[in-house]
Image: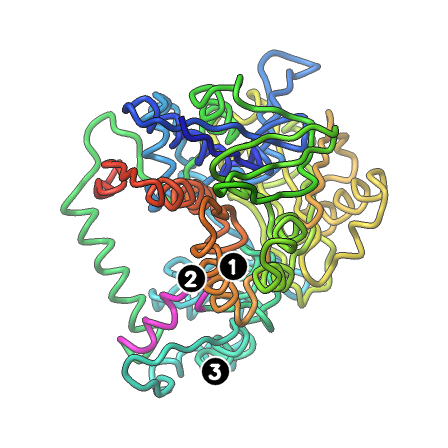
Amino acid sequence: MKRIIIIGGGVAGLGAAYKIRRAASEGHGVDFFLIEKDPRLGGKILTEIIRDPFGKGVFIVDGGPDCFLTEKPACHRIAKLLGIFEDELPTDDSKRGTLIFSQGKLHPLPDGIMMFAPTKFLPFITTQLFSWSGKIRMVMDLFIPPRKIKPGESYDETLESFVVRRMGRECLDRLAEPLVGGVHASDPRTMSLAATFPRLLEMEQAYGSLIRAFLVARKKVEEMRKKYPPKPGQKPRTFFTSFIKGMQQLTDRMAEASGPEKMRLGVSVTSLQIGHQNRWRVHLSDGTFLEGDGVILATESWAAEPLIRPIDREMADALAEIPWTSSATISFAFDEKEVGLDLNAFGVLCPMVEGRSILAATYSSSKWPGRAPPGKVLLRGFVGGPHNQEVLERSDEELVQIVLSEFHEILGLNPKAKPIFFRLYRWPRGMPQYTLGHLERVELIENHSAQISGLALAGGSYRGVGIPNCIESGERAVSKILNEWGIDLAEDHIEEKRYY
């Protein structure tokens, strides 16, 4: 029986564990043991279910990510296997809408904006989000020639460089940065498009214009909707998807199906050794050790680096070059009659140029059905990001007051509204930054790990920060090791299908 030791119990580590469990159930002689330094599994996926202290019902509070992209199939596939596919929760698109805080006012995101390109004339012309000079500069994208690239040449560019070159500074500051850079909590000046949104680079080359490319994309979406209308009683397909009991419903079920008896919490790994016949020895903080035939490092790159350094210094150097930022979310519950807000929106984005403490606010109980009892409201604020790490040095009490103050000034929250409760979640060094050169660093890491038998890395540090990306990274790590042992899982060759 071959054993793989998984270091890290976030969604990537659980994705690896669940795949090994499925391989064992198919008759392959493989097993795992998972080590997690925290007293809980799930990593940054954390959901609290809180009873309403002044009424019936519960609040469902996600402390980390509250959803995944519907178009990415990994979560749907795993949910099907776990029997919770019917618990997937689409957004309430009757309240769909995003507001952008710019120059002291809230502006609705114009209808027809795709990424940061306008595809509908009237909403774009009439919006007050941009000045007339800014609108004219954005439309010039139709006439600016694409960057000249030789056939077969790969290239990269920062978000700032790309957007300013194609659509102007105003588009970057008021739209692209909060919409695109904000998703990754990244600095547009250093954010690698090839590592985060390679499709944008491809669109420029294929269509010569982003507006032209997104007009084509919008037409295809509309044709697909006509060709495949929703069936009666079928859940609507929305851009984002969550789960009825919050995102932790997914990781809890993954852990349960994988085997909690094979997981140890509250202990960290201090060092790794490769011993006789490529057997791995994993030393733990309590003085004990584990032995296995393979190791998957499903941790942040900064946590993997000291463990790898005695084994491969060059790979450790590449891991150390991946920067990280910290962030926090603060959720507040209110009585609806007190907030004084129009809640027919998903939330507010706050561009960095506004110099505010919050990056965004989500109207959680508007975006997701069932997140708060009737008559109650759940709001969530985000702080941190590359330009405001200092705010995270404040105490919990100070952070709560800062976010409440911003809610009053930006959202228009009634200053007399008293929170029923709040929950603050800090994520130190929780978001990797895919800066220029990221793909080259990842390629080096993967090439070096390919030469070390029984070793694989997984997680959001490398090829995607989304939950589906992390699950797939854990599964790829398992495949790498099993393939070295001559085990080829048939399910790896099953084509991903549409789940809606």
- The single residue placed furthest to the left in the displayed view is 227
Residue 323 part of the magenta-drawn span: no
State yes or no: discs 1 and 3 in contact (Cβ < 8 Å): no
Say left or right for 228 vs 257. Answer: left
Residue type at mark 2: give it: Met
Residue placed under numbered mark 1 in the picture: 179
Name the quadrant containing residue 125: bottom left
Residue type at mark 3: give it: Arg
Q: Position of residue 452 (x, y in %)?
A: 47, 52
Residue at 48% across, 55% down: 449
Residue 69 visible here? no
Magenta region? 194-206
Q: Earlier in the sequence, mark 1 or mark 3?
A: 3
Element type where label 1 sits in the image: helix
Specify the label residue 494 is tagged with. none
Q: Earlier in the sequence, mark 2 or mark 1?
A: 2
Mark 2 → mark 1, Cα distance in angstroms: 7 Å
Residue placed under numbered mark 2 in the picture: 115
